[in-house]
Image: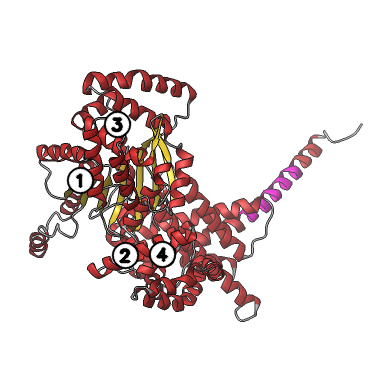
Amino acid sequence: MSASMRLLVRRAIRLSDTNIQISAAARAAARAAARSSSCRCFSDAAEDRSTHFGFETVPETEKAKRVYKVFENVAQRYDIMNDAMSLGIHRVWKDMLLHAMHPQPGVRLLDVAGGTGDISFRFLEYVRSQQERQRRRAARSMQTPSWQDISNNYSTEDEDGPLESRAVVCDINKEMLKVGKQKADSMGISTGLSWVVGDAEELPFDDDQFDIYTIAFGIRNVTHIDQALREALRVLKPGGRFMCLEFSKVTNPVLARLYDAYSFQMIPVLGEVIAGDWKSYQYLVESIRKFPDQEEFTGMIEDAGFYCVQYRNLTGGVVALHSGFKL
Amino acid sequence: MAALLRGVRAGRALRGLSSVVAAPTATTPQCSSLSRGFHRAAPRLQDDFKSDKPPPSSSSTTFHEHYQAHSAEQDNTATASHEGAAAEQASRPNTSYQDQSGEQGEEYETEEQLQARILTAALEFVPLHGWSMEAIASGAETLGLSSASTGMFNNGAGDLVLHFITQCNSQLTEILAEQHKQVQLGQAESKATADFLRDAVETRLRMYIPYIESWPQAMSILLLPHNIPDSLKHLSTLVDDIWYYAGDRSTDMNWYTKRAALTGIYNTTELVMLQDSSPDFEDTWNFLDNRIQDVVNMASTAKQVQSTGEAVVQGLMGAAFTLKNLTGLNQRR
């Protein structure tokens, strides 16, 4: 119901051909959408509260729409831009996330703001190669199998069902999911992967569903981060793990200056040249600066109800990997 | 604000209830999702704890009392979860101040205690998976936690092995303390030092017998560079405890020599035990006997050597004096 309201609002905005002036009808619709949307805690004053959109200040209700438009515009060139902007290091960051996760066979992953599916693809590959290794180790230890063992093996080969790991990619933006699905098709991955449209602040899943919840470079775009964290707590099983990969504050001052210069001078230019969109990448860079730093974010995760919250700085603090458990 | 939160929780409870109806595989009572403690751990752990082996460490014995007292509350919450509107009513005592403080004392455990519980549960999977993350994952699953919770253990298998060692050490300390108390009460007689050491080391090494197949893997994990400080610390506290209960109160060089001797005995006996195939490890215990005898003999031999040395020195001095007399160097003119 709320999703359809939001869709109406978006169409109204596109028709009115501006992203600054919202027509009265759209504003009324937006207000109604806000009430029925995920901002349960702040029911009446939602449209009066403002939040940051990069370095701009915008009403909270508008931020989600503008973020949607940003990612809609960049979806086609998202992966190429990632490689160009981070000089390929984003692959290392995502691999380190998987290594820290060390998923056991048979776990269910929810990849929120998963967009083009990078984390999910890596997850499936990791689990499958682990299972391969285990199978090879079992085979090696049974050098001279008896007939009993061989017949058992034949029966267990189809039993991949209970140990099947599944990944669900959830994103609010349909364009990003479309690109991800195309990638999956071209890579030939079909089993164990689902694509779901959903809002991180209001996930379309029941409680206690997933073993691992990841959100890689997505949580800074969420309007109410604490809401998203609470939703993460809700959909995780007891013992489940929350992992968040996000740009953060660089600790080293020299590196910080270089990083700032690179972010503000180079990245929007790259955005214009490669993707034809200066503004979106300006937003991206500004939103990094607006995101709370490592310690503050750790506090937010603990407030949401997670335990054993830790973080690890990657590349000197450019990216931080936060992890918490639902115990 | 609290009312809003309660409203939110009610909403969640109702949604949760619908999912309980839809998915009857959910085992935890939905009411537990309302309170933030380890409330949901209680029903699972009731069963686990009863079937657990004799509680190894003192922290888990305190748990036993907590969860006994908790069974009444568990029934309360279990019945509450099956009623719709009444769920809020029945759970309100959980959120009221008075009960919350009592509840917090009983049901909240620290993260370390939960980790200890997971590792203890993981020990029964060691014969199957070895000392590895898979064993910890299986242990977590028996406690009803997702296998993703193994991420809490940064040291992986090392955490499991060190936890086991700590558990064995505390078990041994309890046994020795109990024996000591018996002696103090006069219900048993005190043993000779050699016998005491032999019995203590044998008791301690017998704790490895269920895991003896995979023990070489555990020893290799303990020898990894980042585990060496911890494993040495555990070994030294073990040896110190045994000597303390053996009655050693020395404050001189003997303190070091005694502990060094016992460390050597313990390590070598452990290695012998790894490749011992005799029934009930008889060869190992014989080896242990012989090593302890060696140390005892060494002590008396040392004394003998010292007194012999003194005697020899005196003899030589006498001979030199006689020679001096004979050659006339000793005369005073």
Q: Badge 1: how crowded within 10 Å, few (<14), some, or many (20+)? A: many
Instruction: Identify residue for label 4.
Output: B34
Q: Which of B89 and A57 is in front in this view?
A: A57
Please, which chain is the residue tagged with disc 3 on?
A
Q: Earlier in the sequence, mark 2 or mark 4?
A: 2
Instruction: Identify residue for label 2.
Output: B16
Q: Mark 1 and mark 4: span between their CA atoms? A: 33 Å
Q: Mark 2 and mark 1: span between their CA atoms? A: 29 Å
B316 in the magenta segment: yes
Please, which chain is the residue tagged with disc 1 on?
A
Instruction: Identify residue for label 3.
Output: A19
The answer to whether mark 3 and mark 2 are in CB contact below 8 A is no
Q: Is residue B276 left or right of residue B196?
A: left
Q: Is mark 4 on a helix, strand or loop?
A: loop
B21 in the magenta segment: no
Inspect this view and state whether residue A86 appears: no
The answer to whether mark 1 and mark 4 are in CB contact below 8 A is no
Please, which chain is the residue tagged with disc 2 on?
B
Q: Mark 4 and mark 3: span between their CA atoms? A: 41 Å
Q: Tell me residue A271's x, y (percent).
A: 27, 22
Q: Which disc number belongs to residue A124?
A: 1
What residue is drawn where x is 47% and y is 70%? B92
Q: Tell me residue A224's x, y (percent).
A: 39, 45
Q: Nearer the viewer, residue A60 or B14?
A: A60
Q: Residue furthest bottom?
A: B187
